[in-house]
Image (tube, helix red, strand yellow):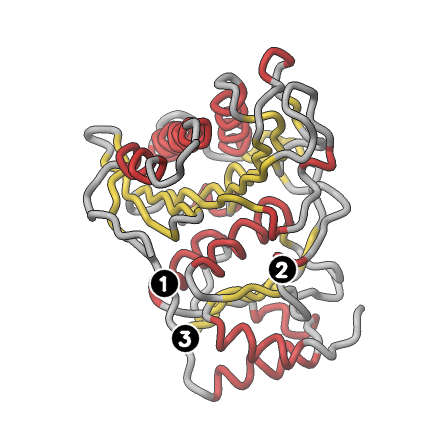
């Protein structure tokens, strides 16, 4: 496992990592710097949302049928601008866009596809609860120097080369997963830099927290109810914010499992595969945890649509395995 000195900047971390890969050109480093810049800009706007008139909705709905918040629009545009003009990205898949976004033709030789939920948990914006950005990175399959195709994004989760999230809460935290492991960085707003605060994040074998909206109890399948009853009987603590990235981050630090199963209303699940489930599943596995759709590993799925949905069980491996064993034989709705 790579060892890094706590307190180094994100840029130093990226450059130190780069040196360990002979032949690396630095394009990936530039990509991560662009993502970090977008995170800093969104963090600044989130912290001033009330003063900047950014609370509330736009009156529109997105491709998911969800009400669009003003900060959703800002975050989406910020990520597109940050990723479009440095030559590293050929295509962006965003929750807020109906289709894949091709970067301007002068830059379409970029080698990476970025999938992003620009502002996860945006329904919590107006109550000042924790929200975040989730992202994943694929290497394109088509030839560099040509326009990217949708198939460049519709790859198995096993093809991810990096993933992470930026959490906007009491502080702004960037968690990044690569071949170099899983590491957390805290933003110091006084100097505008991310500093390494959580090197080599790992999930233990067990956790004692479960995060699930039990208000949907009557819509869950028998296996889901069985595992929830088992955990309650075993004295697990229930913690549920309703923001996927916030619930995942707490469980990553403290140990636990997050569940968003299929329901009668959403028989295919509610969370999006490419830019929510895939990136967090990648991080969970890097941390020694697991992620399934209630039947098999999330990362084994090959998506057929950009906004494909999935159930999700993610966190400490023992709890994920326990839940999956009970859910696997549930009939489909």
Tell me, yes or no, whether the two marked residues, 2 and 3, touch with CB atoms within 8 Å. no
Against 271, is 19 above or below?
above
Q: Which residue is mark 3?
A: 205
Which sits earlier in the primary sequence, circle 2 or circle 3? 3
Secondary structure under badge 2? helix
Q: Which residue is mark 2?
A: 298
| Alpha carbons under labels 2 and 1: distance apart | 19 Å
Tag 1 residue: 202
- For this view, does 278 lie left or right of residue 250? right
Work out how far the residue at label 2 is from the one at label 3, CA to CA, in angstroms. 19 Å
Q: What whole-number distance in Å separates the C-alpha atoms at marks 3 and 1?
A: 9 Å
Q: Quadrant of residue 116?
A: top right
- In the image, 67 versus 285, the foreground residue is 285
How many callouts does the rendering have?
3
Q: What residue is shown at x 69% (from left), y 20% (from top)?
A: 146
User: Residue 108, located in which quarter of the rendered image?
Assistant: top right
Which labelled disc corresponds to residue 272? none
Secondary structure beneath disc 3?
Answer: loop
Comes first in the chain, label 2 or label 1: 1
Q: Is residue 212 left or right of residue 306?
A: left
Which residue of the protein is positioned furthest toward the bottom in this rendering?
233
Q: Residue at x 61, y 83 (%)?
A: 226
Residue at 56% over, 76% down? 321
Disc 2 packing (10 Å; few <14; some 14–19; many ≥20):
many
């Amino acid at each position: 496992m790579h060892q890094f000195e706590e307190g180094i900047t994100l840029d130093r971390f990226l450059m130190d990592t780069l040196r360990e890969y002979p032949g690396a050109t630095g394009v990936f480093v530039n990509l991560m710097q662009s993502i970090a810049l977008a995170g800093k800009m969104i963090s600044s706007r989130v912290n001033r949302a009330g003063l900047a008139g950014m609370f509330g909705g736009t009156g529109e709905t997105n491709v998911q049928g969800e009400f669009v918040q003003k900060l959703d629009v800002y975050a989406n545009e910020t990520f597109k601008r940050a990723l479009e003009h440095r030559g590293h990205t050929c295509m962006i898949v965003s929750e807020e866009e109906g289709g894949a976004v091709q970067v301007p033709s002068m830059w379409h030789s970029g080698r990476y596809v970025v999938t992003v939920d620009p502002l996860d948990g945006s329904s919590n914006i107006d109550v000042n609860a924790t929200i975040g950005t989730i992202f994943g990175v694929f290497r394109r399959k088509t030839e560099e120097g040509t326009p990217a195709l949708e198939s460049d994004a519709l790859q198995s989760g096993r093809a991810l080369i990096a993933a992470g999230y930026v959490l906007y809460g009491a502080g702004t935290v960037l968690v990044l997963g690569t071949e170099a492991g899983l590491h957390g960085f805290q933003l110091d707003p006084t100097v505008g830099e991310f500093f390494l605060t959580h090197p080599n994040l790992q999930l233990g074998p067990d956790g004692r927290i479960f995060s699930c909206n039990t208000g949907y109890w009557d819509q869950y399948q028998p296996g889901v109810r069985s595992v929830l009853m088992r955990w309650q009987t075993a004295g697990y603590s229930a913690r549920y914010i309703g923001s996927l990235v916030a619930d995942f981050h707490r469980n990553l630090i403290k140990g636990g499992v997050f569940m968003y199963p299929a329901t009668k209303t959403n028989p295919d699940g509610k969370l999006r595969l490419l830019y929510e489930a895939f990136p967090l599943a990648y991080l969970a596995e890097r941390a020694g945890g697991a992620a399934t759709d209630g039947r098999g590993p999330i990362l084994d799925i090959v998506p057929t649509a950009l906004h494909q949905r999935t159930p999700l069980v993610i966190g400490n491996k023992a709890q994920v395995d326990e839940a999956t064993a009970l859910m696997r034989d549930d009939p489909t709705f």
